[in-house]
Structure formats: C-alpha cells, structure tokens
Amino acid sequence: MRIYKVGGAVRDRLLGKPVTDIDWVVVGATTEEMLAKGFRPVGADFPVFLHPKSGEEYALARTERKSGRGYGGFTFHASPEVTLEEDLIRRDLTINAMAEDDQQNLTDPYHGQRDLEARLLRHVSPAFAEDPLRVLRVARFAARYAALGFTVAPETLELMRQLSDSGELEALTPERSWKEISRALMEDQPQVFVEVLRACGALKVLMPEVDALFGVPQPPAHHPEIDTGAHTLGVLQQAATHKQPLTVRWACLLHDLGKGLTPEQEWPRHIAHEFKGLKLIKAVNERFKVPRDCQELALLVGEYHTHGHRALELKPSTLLELLQSFDIYRRPQRFEEFIAACEMDARGREGLEERSYPQADYLRGAATAARSVAVQPLLEKGFKGPELGEAIKRERLKALKAYKETAST
Ligand code: ATP
Ligand code: MG
C-alpha cells in the first residue's frame, strides 16, 4: 500500500500556512489490510480509518458516482485498483486535489499548484456539481484566503450558480450547512463568504432574509454606507476584526433582518424593524438547527440592539427591563456578548469603524448597579414569594436611578 498526504495539509504547506489536521489517502489497500494494521474504522458510508496512534484520518482511495439527490445520493467505490489520480479527481477544488508522499513529491494532475500561484479557487471537474455542499465550501475557502488575494474562478462561480438555481441546495441537511456556515463565520473575512454566496445566487436560496437586505436603503445620517446589505457585511467584518465568538458573529449577521420587510414607501426609515425581524431570525435559526446559544443571542440582539445604542438616554425603568430580559444575574456572559454585538453594529458603518462606543461601559455599569442589590436584607424584612420579587425590582430600580444620576454628572 502507498500512503499520501492530501487536501488541506498539502495546500496549506505550499501556502506557507500552519497545518492543523492532516488527511491521508491510502492507495492499493483493502479494508482487511487496514484493520490488520490496527486502524480503527469510522463512518458507515466511506472506507475511512483512524490511525491507531495519531488518530488522523486515513481514507482508502475511492471513486464516487452520483446516484440520487442530496448527500446520500452517492455511490462509492473503493478498491486496491483505484489510483491516486482517480481519487483526486473527485475532490472539490484543484488546490485541494494535490497529494504528497513521504519525500514531499507532489502529485498534482489537476494543476492545483498553478491555481495556488494564480490565487484561484477552481473546481477540479464537472463532477463538482454533484455535491451542493461544495458551493458553501468554496465560499468558505474564499473567506479564508481572501486576505491572500484568492478569488473564485469565473467558470467555478458559474457552476455554483447552476447548482444554486437547480434547487439542489435545498437537499442539504441543516447539520452539513451549519457546519460550513459556522466555520465560515469564524474566518478572518466572513463577509466574503456572504458575498460569494450572493454572487452565485446561493444566498437567495439559503438565507433569502439576508439576501433581501441588499438594495434596501437606510438614513445616511446614521448609515453613510446607506445599503442595509453593505451595512450587515460591515458589521460582520468588524466582528471578525475584533475576534468575536461565533454567537456574536451570528447575531451580527441577523440583527437587521426586519429591515428587509419595510414597505418601500417608508424607506429609508425602518420603524419597529427590531420587532418585525424576530420571526425571520427564528426562521433562519430553525432552518439550520443553529445551536441554542447562537439562536438566543441572535434573537436578543435583534430585539434590543437599538436599546443598546440608546443606552445613555434610556429611562431607569427601561434599562431595568433590558437587564431583566437578558437575565444578567445568571447569564453575565450573554449580556457581554450583546454589548459586543451592539458595538460591532455601531462600527460596521462606512467611515465610523473607529468611533468610540461609550454605551458599552455604560451598560456594564448599569448591570453592576442592578446586580449590587442584595437579597438578604429584603428577606430579613420578611418579604416572600412574589412580594420579594417586587421588592428586589424596586431596589434595582433605585440603584439604576442613582447610577444614571452619577453617570450623567
Ligand atoms: P480544512 O483546512 O478546512 O480542514 P481541507 O481542505 O482539509 O480544509 P476537509 O474538509 O478536511 O478540508 O477535507 C479534506 C479534503 O477532502 C479536501 O481538501 C478535499 O480534497 C476533500 N473534500 C472534502 N469535502 C469535500 C466535498 N464535499 N467535495 C469534494 N471534496 C471534498
Ligand atoms: Mg482537513
């Protein structure tokens, strides 16, 4: 049997990037031989094994043939006769279809190295169109390597467009889509992911609610960039620049969905967009079975981001309602993430990227004031049940009034 490094490890070494996980392909072996060498089988669908010591993935060289819709619609053929070239041709991009032996001899039948130099994300063969997930993968790689100058080859973008128009994207499972979306959002240029999806018509299929924001104007006084889609991309970019976690990035992407519902005659104003957007945020959350923490933060940021921006003007009672909605007593981190998302929203505007955001510290101070109310003295006074709740609220309100007064002097 012959063993080669493939995929990302070869690509990233040639790019001079750190290699994190290594994928291997094994040519000329049978499942029985692999098991005899102590490899552990994984995955019911493909002949993939884990190395007994390193735990890295070793896949038998295989060919694929499309036999139906979606991911399940593939038949695989693995045997000792399948060649390295045959295995490489089923891969998505030329830069991902190179292999290397233990002497670092490159096998590159589809000119991945040439495309690396040309900074092009190009499909290997027309079979690219057989797996719609590749549309998301290419957009994700575009986001990852945008800073190096990579773009999607026009003919690959055209194939992605055909795939998006064909309805095949709808056959993707929520889990597979979310895995790509979440990884793409964590790249340095996540806005490129959204741009590429939009350029090939996939955004309209996957997240029509986000697609609808492009072409919707906002008041230039607050939004020099005017376009709501451009603003959303700017917010996402800020979130990446400021190394925000996935929860915040997801909330940034969805925070203004309500603006896509504003009747044209109301443009560029968006009255009550925060509330109107909630059902859209919920729909996108459910479509991709998004993890709970991301779902929650997106809904809260959608509903309350304008409150965040107006923090210094809020009445103490409104401020208290905001803090209560976030359950800041038990969920301090979630409130921090809300503040971060608001700040990214404020900075994701053309020319305002470096502005200060005093609302952030003001909100933190308010949360500290509300949390400082001690329950014990109220218990000692004999408050119980719902009355205790009311008494705590009254004390917190007092604390917030005092906080607002000191903060404004
Ligand atoms: P990363 O750095 O994100 O791990 P990678 O290129 O190693 O990038 P993997 O998802 O680990 O990506 O996949 C390893 C290799 O398997 C890819 O480089 C590619 O050759 C191939 N591959 C993975 N998924 C697909 C797919 N859906 N269609 C075609 N080829 C794929
Ligand atoms: Mg990999």
Image (tube, rainbow, N blue to C red):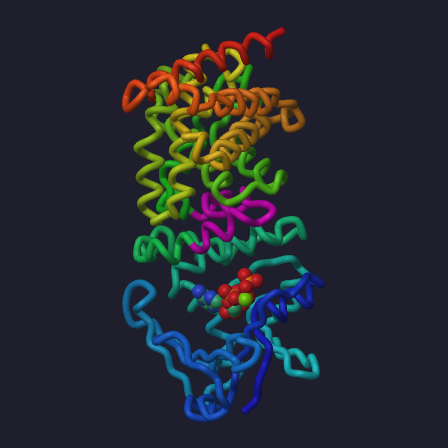
**Can residue 50 be seen in this snapshot?**
yes
Q: Position of residue 246 (x, y in %)?
A: 50, 45
Q: Which residues are magenta?
A: 179-200
Tell whether 311 sits left or right of 167.
right
The x, y position of residue 84, in whole percent, is 53, 83
Does residue 24 appear to the left or right of 77 in the view shown?
A: right
Q: Considering only vertical position in the picture, is 229 above or below 407?
A: below
Residue drawn at x 41%, y 44% is 203
Residue drawn at x 37%, y 27% as measured from the top left: 258
- Camera-side residue of 229 and 31: 31
Q: Residue at x 69, y 79 (%)?
A: 104
Q: Is the C terminus in the top left, top right, bottom left or bottom right quadrant? A: top right
Q: Quadrant of ligand 2?
A: bottom right
Residue 129 higher or lower than 271, as above or below: below
In the rendered view, tell whether residue 394 sits above or below residue 226: above
Is residue 124 shown to the viewer in this render?
no
- Which quadrant of the rendered structure holds the N terminus? bottom right
Between 407 and 306, the residue placed more toward the observer is 407
Q: Nearer the viewer, residue 340 or 151?
A: 340
Helix, strand or loop for the magenta stretch, by majority? helix
Quick check: is 278 in the magenta stretch?
A: no
Front position in the image: 332 or 357: 332
Which residue sits at x=53%, y=36%?
A: 233
Residue 70 located left or right of residue 92: left
| Spot occupied by residue 260 in the image (x, y as percentages of width and height) | 38, 28
Number of numbered callouts drawn: 0
